[in-house]
Structures are given as structure tokens and as C-alpha cells.
Amino acid sequence: MNKKIMLSIQSGKTELIFFILYKLLIDFSYVTIIRDNYNEYNQFITDFSLIKYIIAFIFLITLYLLNIKALLSVSKMIVKLFLLLMYVPISTVYACKNDSTVFFMTITAGFFIFIMTASFMIRNIKIKKEKKNDSFIELATNLLYYGFIAITVILVLSCIYFNGLPSLTALNLRDVYEVRQAFYLPRYLYYLYEFEAGFIIYFLIIVNMKRKNIKALIVFIFIQFLFFLWKGDKSAIFGLITVIAVYLISGKLQLNKMLCKLFFSFTSISLILFYTVSSLPFLLLIRRMLIIPANLKFIYYDFFMNHDYIGIVGTVLNSFLKIPDPYAQLPYQNLISKLYFNKVEMWSNTGFLAEGYARGGIIGSLLISGLMGVILYLIYLGVKKTDSRFILSIAIIPMITLNDGYLLTSFTFGSVGLLCVTCFFFDLKYLKTDFNKIINIKGRWLNDETANKKSETE
């Protein structure tokens, strides 16, 4: 047998072993540490079901192998990330709490749908590259890049105007909530800030890392640090470290092949530190990032099984249709907190796997999963235009936030939508730095369009 094929098979087996070990560590963390030490809301009960544990394990391995076989490049890695970040903790809660089989199967079906939707589109929908479109892509590329820079400058000036020069208070992580409450921007500027914090600043950082423009890179990293000081949002620092690390690691190593090993390593280190030095890494990575969102997904199912669905409330489409919000008096995120945690002031949000059910039950879950498959296809198109390292680096934060955030809202008016637009219209090789060349792009594009129309008429 070919030596490369043998090495690939061996590598796949090794990765699968780490995937299983990671799953076992999450199970161990739940039944021994979280249940006994961090169960302040009495939500992390243990009612272990061996049958459900076996079922979860079988579907977990099946989805992992299906993803490896069906998808390509960055799309494959994103699904693998979802499996590690979402599905493994969900399978832990499902079996260890003896939770709903209906909802677990709905989530499993959702994974199957977005893997197969993306696989079908990648293999059957080919975008032909035509020379007449090059000038349009060139124009779109530069409009996106310099438009994002303009938005960043506007937001920096707005933050100075409405909040003054940033203080160093946010550096004390205990005070970040006070800083966050004091932060203010008018409504539409705040929408821009959400775009900036969720995608734009990371995009600008990665573009300039790719171009090796050190001066611009330092400026954008500094701006991100200023945003952290102004708003006290810890995710700003987490996101900055993540995108830079992903870009650097994926340039030296095959990040897709080492993702399971990384998750296993971080989980192991967190457990070791918990028992020896500090519980903080364990609380942030395993409890906050993995178990709590997984548990909330089952709580969402339990809540919306007995309450009204939200439909398209909270999306751009509803600003036109004006469908009444059934939770206008008290947002359902607060109502869930009141009913399940006895803390009405707490905002209980979770990711897109539960969003679909909240919007339309099982049908809503499957439709949202189909949309995720389309997004994976658009990301694949971005890879075809540039390269996997660049697209992965700009996609990593919007994808990670889907563990706690909504897909439909983010796709229609948020960071996932900006990511899709960028993947479809941005091509790094057309980016210009000479201002005179930028001005000439529109003229060339209009001339090409006129010539094409004339040719079609003749």
C-alpha cells in the first residue's frame, strides 16, 4: 500500500483516539468536579443513563467519521470544532443528566444535515471564474477593506467622544462589569461596534498579518486593546489571542489534524491546574465554555416545549413584517433565568443549535442546520479565492461565538453575515495600496460592464 495512504490512516486513528480521550475528560469533569463543586443553581445533577451514554458515543463517532469523509479543508475543520465545542459537551449532559432523547436526536440530525448540505453544495455547485467579473471583485475587495477601516476610525472617534479617553480600570478583571455598564454609544453606532468587535477588527488584523504590514498590524492590535479598555469585554482579548494564534499555528502546522489533540491538551492542563494551582482555567474552559452552554441548550428545549416559539423575532426580516414578540414584557432569556435559576436579572443565551428549536421547534432546528450548511459552502468559496489559512483565521471567532450566539441574527445582521460577504466578494490579490489605483478600479469596472452589454447586444 502507498506510504502516504498508510500515514494518513495512522494519523486518522491517532486523532480519533484523542477525540475519544477528550470526550472522557469532559465526562469526568462533569460527574466529579462540576456536579460537586460548581452547582450553585442545582442544574448539574447526575442521573447517569448507560443506554444514553452508549447512544451518544455511537452518534459522536459516526458524525466525526462522516465529517472526515464528506467535507474538505476549512469546512471540515469548522465542523470538527463544532463537534468538540458543542456536540461532545451536549452528549455528556444528555447521558449524565438522563436528559431529553428527542432534543439530542434533533441536534444529531442537525449536525448530519449541515454536514451533508455543505458536502452536496461543494461537490455539485461550481462557480465558474470569468474574466469579466475580475474588475467587480477588485472593486468589492477594496470597498470592503477600506470601508472596514473607515468604520474602525469612526468608532474610535465615537468612543473618545462619548466615553472619553480609556482608563486602565478594565485591566483589573474584577472591575470589568462596572466598566461594561459605564460604556455608552448611541444605538446605530453600537450596532457598528458589534460588527467591529465580532468581525471587522479581526479581519483587518489578519489581512495585515498576511500582507506583512507590521505598522498597520500594530495599529489595529492597539485599537483592539483600546476597545477592551473602553468596554471591558474580556472576549476582545480572547479573540485577539485566538485569531493570531490560529494564523501562526496554521502556517506552521496542519491545524485541522491537530485540533483534537489541542482540545485534549487544554482540557488536561485545566484539570491538572484545578487540582494543583488554580481553578480558573478549568472554570473558563470546561465549565463556562463547554458545559454551561450545553446544559442551557437542554433548558431551552424544556422551556420552548411548553412556551411560545419566537419565530423570526429579533431578526432584520421582522423589522419589516412586525410580527409581535410573545416575550415583549420580559425577554425569554430573563424568563428562563427566572424559572430555572431564580435570577431574573441574568441573561441566559445559548447557541444556534438551540436557537432553531426556540424559533420553530424541530422544524426550526433542521432549517437552521440547513442554513449552517450553506454558510460552510460560502466559506469554502472563500478558500477557493484566497487560501485556507486566511479564511480560517477570519472565520474562527464568528464560528466560536455560535456556541453562545444565534445564527439567524448573526447571518442577517452580524459577524457571520460579514464573514459570508467577505468570503464571496473579497480576494486578497486584488487589494490595492496606491490611492490612484483604487480610484481607477471603478472606471475599469464600468468600462467592462459597458463592453459586456455592447457585446451581448451585438
Image: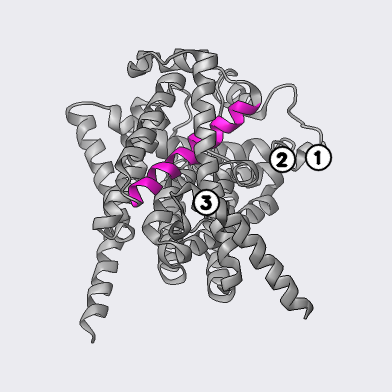
Confirm whether the magenta stretch covers residue 203: yes
Residue 200 visible in the picture: yes
Based on the displayed image, in which of its 4 quarters is residue 288 positioned? Answer: top left
Estimate the spatial distance between the alpha carbons at disc 2 and disc 3, rounded to whole Å. 32 Å
Q: Which mark is residue 320?
A: 1
How packed mark 2 is, by other alpha carbons closer than 10 Å (few <14, some 14-19, many 20 or more), is some
Pick whichever of labels 2 and 3 is earlier in the sequence: 2
- Check disc 3 and report the residue beneath it: 438
* Nearest to viewer (mark 1 / mark 3): 3
Confirm whether the magenta stretch covers residue 259: no
| Outermost residue toward the bottom in this view | 1
| Outermost residue toward the left in this view | 276
What percent of the width, then of the height, locates residue 334?
Answer: 62, 24
* Nearest to viewer (mark 2 / mark 3): 3
Residue 24 visible in the picture: no
Amino acid on which the number 2 mark rests in the picture: Val
Residue range (magenta) = 188-210
Q: Are marks 2 and 3 in contact (CB under 8 Å)?
A: no
Q: Secondary structure at mark 3?
A: helix
Q: Which mark is residue 316?
A: 2
